[in-house]
Image: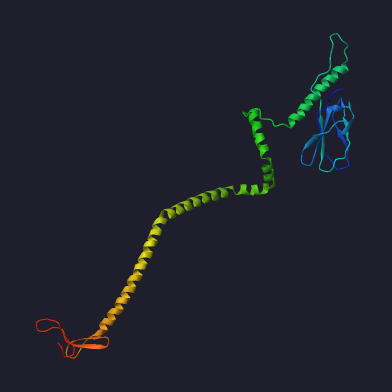
Amino acid sequence: MTIASEANRSGPYLCNGATTHFPYAFRIYDAAHIRVILTDPLGIETTLALATDYTVSGVGDSGGGAVQTATAYASGYRVTLILNVPFTQETDLENQGAYFAETIERAIDLQTQMSLQLKELIARAMVLPVTSSITSEALTSAVLSLSAIQSQMLALVGISADIQTVADIADDVVAAHGNAITAATAADVSVAAAVSTSGSVAEATNQAAAAHSSAESATTTLLALSGALTTLAGAFSVDANGHLKVTYAETAISDIHVSDASGHLLISYGDAA
């Protein structure tokens, strides 16, 4: 027997609530040398148990065989079959013992299957370029960091079209960002200036209010004085003889001479001097 194919997995098969028969296309020498993986709709994988969850047919056949599951899994589930050869070497060749070519060939086949199993595993692994200077530790750290934000990344997938739209107007977005910063800076300066002058504005307002009050008081005083002067002016008059006449309480005081020959003021009431 030989291992003429590099096939190392079959599936994943989409379940439909009815199918329980899943073929595999690689040789196995033991029913335990195949691993049956069930993936649920959320992507969570579970390894099924031999004899409990499934049985295997076609053991030893070069073209493979099939796995028969005990349950017909519902739509949304998937079944995948991969090699599961243990990494051991159990062939014991005794010195000068009998030579059985079939025994040697089977041992070599198992080694080949181990290599195919590793090949399948490596095909699912993240491999660095040959010339990369990134260490495996740095790569692992980066992958773990991405794993921590998996939910956010999945959310971005849902708005990928919007992200592409923004990418197409990236220059405009950058320009808008710059304009926003400029406007914010100008606003900060204006606010600072207003704050710095608020004291002067308040002081000027108080002074203006005080001046307004003083002006009102002065206006009231002037109006009162004007009235008094008007009344006083109406009390004085000059008669036909050129004498000053004062009317007080409707009583005329006449014969008030401006001055005598010596320049003295003469006041007469009636005929009295």
Residue ID at (46%, 54%): 191
Towards the viewer: 142 or 63: 142
Q: Which of these two is toward me, 116 or 147?
A: 147
The C terminus sits in image quarter: bottom left
Is 84 positioned to the left or the right of 217 in the image? right
Q: Position of residue 185 (x, y in %)?
A: 48, 50
Q: Nearer the viewer, residue 16 or 144?
A: 144
Image position of 20 with respect to 258: above or below: above
Judging depth in this view, the residue of 230 and 157 nearest the camera is 230
Above/below status of 38 relative to 253: above
- Residue 49 lies in what quarter of the image? top right
Rendered residue at 68%/37% (across/down): 147
Q: Quadrant of the N terminus?
A: top right
Identity of the residue drawn at 64% across and 29% down: 137
- Labels in figure, total: 0
What is the quadrant of residue 58 in the picture?
Answer: top right
Given the current orientation, which residue lies at the most extreme top position?
Answer: 96
Residue 59 location (% of width, % of height): 89, 27
x and y percent of residue 54 in the render? Answer: 88, 33
